[in-house]
Image: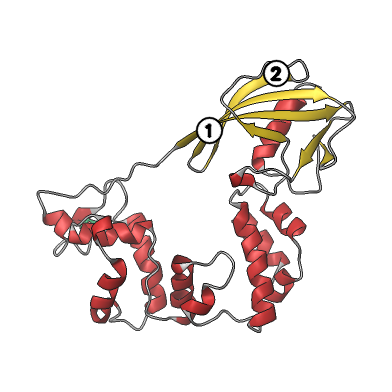
Amino acid sequence: MPYFNKFTKKFKTLKDLSKSNEKVILKMWEGLGYYRRARNLLACSKYLVNYHNSKIPKTLEELKKLPGIGDYTGNALLGLVYDKPTIAIDGNVKRVFSRYLNKEEDKIDFDKLIEKNRKQLFNTNRNADFVEALMEFGALVCKPKDPNCYTCCLNKTCKYFKSKNKINTIRKKMIKIKDYNIFCYINKKKQIALTKANQISFLKDFNLPKIMESNNFLINRDWKFLKSYKNSISNLKLNINLYYKFSDKIPSSYNWYSLENNKEFIPSFTKKIFRQVSTLF
Ligand code: SF4
């Protein structure tokens, strides 16, 4: 909430937001993760101001032309903003339908199901509330684990509740494990060299030290080993070996940043590296 309040206080309209720049937006977003969303939000505001007279488009087709908007967000916007009869199908909503029918998610054609039951589903003049309610119902009542079936308003007709042969709706999170060697140029002024020229998919184009995917422990006289630690980013578990060297010379794509305070945005992943390297001083 503090992030949201600060953000909406600074940018009161789409126009205000569109006049800003990535540096400012990312600095305000610092610590939240999912930085691509910040970039998309800024890009969206510029697109809307330039091509849609600062209005949210009214069709899914037009909405999907906006940066970062797909079926889910597009449908959510149509429902929430324009009260259109749509459903934003996220994991929660899929699970509700799947349990109600006691049928595995991958065996359900959700678009077809909604189209076929259009009259019953949208038998309301509160479509915006319906979009929201369905998502909340999945998050609070028909929860991933231990759904509140005994108090649920749908239990009289819910096939999952009635069935002795219930489908499995608990999804295992796919966790990927990756190993990285990270190399930090540092200097006596308590600065570290960072570059945006990295190919790390989860932090592409963000400030990082030299980083290489590898499961080999490095033995190299140029770089001193500092420590090994773990870091998690959404479904990634990272094993990190951190190396450093004091140097005044750095490759041309790198710039020096203070380890103590920065006006520029630094992702949490990089800040964690700062904390480790700071122990050297
Ligand atoms: S009865 Fe249980 S499984 Fe069925 S919709 Fe309600 S909470 Fe979900």
Q: How is this picture coloured?
A: secondary structure
The one nearer the camera, 250 or 166, is 250
Foreground residue among 61 and 150: 61
| Nearer-the-camera pick, 16 or 154 | 16
Above/below status of 67 relative to 200: below
Residue 119 relative to residue 90: left or right? left
Q: Which residue is mark 1?
A: 178
Q: Residue at x 53, y 79 (%)?
A: 62
Query: For residue 79, what is the image quadrant?
Result: bottom left
Amino acid type at image mark 2:
Phe
- The amino acid sitting under disc 1 is Lys
| Residue 252 point in image, percent of width and height | 85, 41
Determine the image quadrant of residue 187.
Answer: top right
How far separated are the C-alphas under marks 1 and 2? 19 Å
The secondary element bearing badge 2 is classed as strand
Near mark 2 (Cα within 10 A), the count class, few <14, some 14-19 or many ≥20, is some
Label 1 within 8 A of ligand 1 by Cβ: no
Quarter of the image containing the C terminus?
top right
Q: Is residue 13 visible?
A: no
Give the side of residue 59 with respect to residue 137, left or right.
right
Quadrant in the picture for the N terminus = bottom right
Q: Position of residue 205 (x, y in %)?
A: 69, 49
190 displayed left or right of 173 = right
- The circle drawn on residue 244 is none
Ligand 1 visible in quadrant: bottom left
Residue lying at 36% horizontally and 67% vertically, measured from the top left = 133
Residue 27 % position (x, y): 73, 52
Query: Against 204, is 106 above or below?
Result: below
Residue 158 picture quarter: bottom left
Task: Tell me, for residue 225, which label it has, or none.
Answer: 2
Whether residue 125 is visible: yes
Label 1 SS: strand
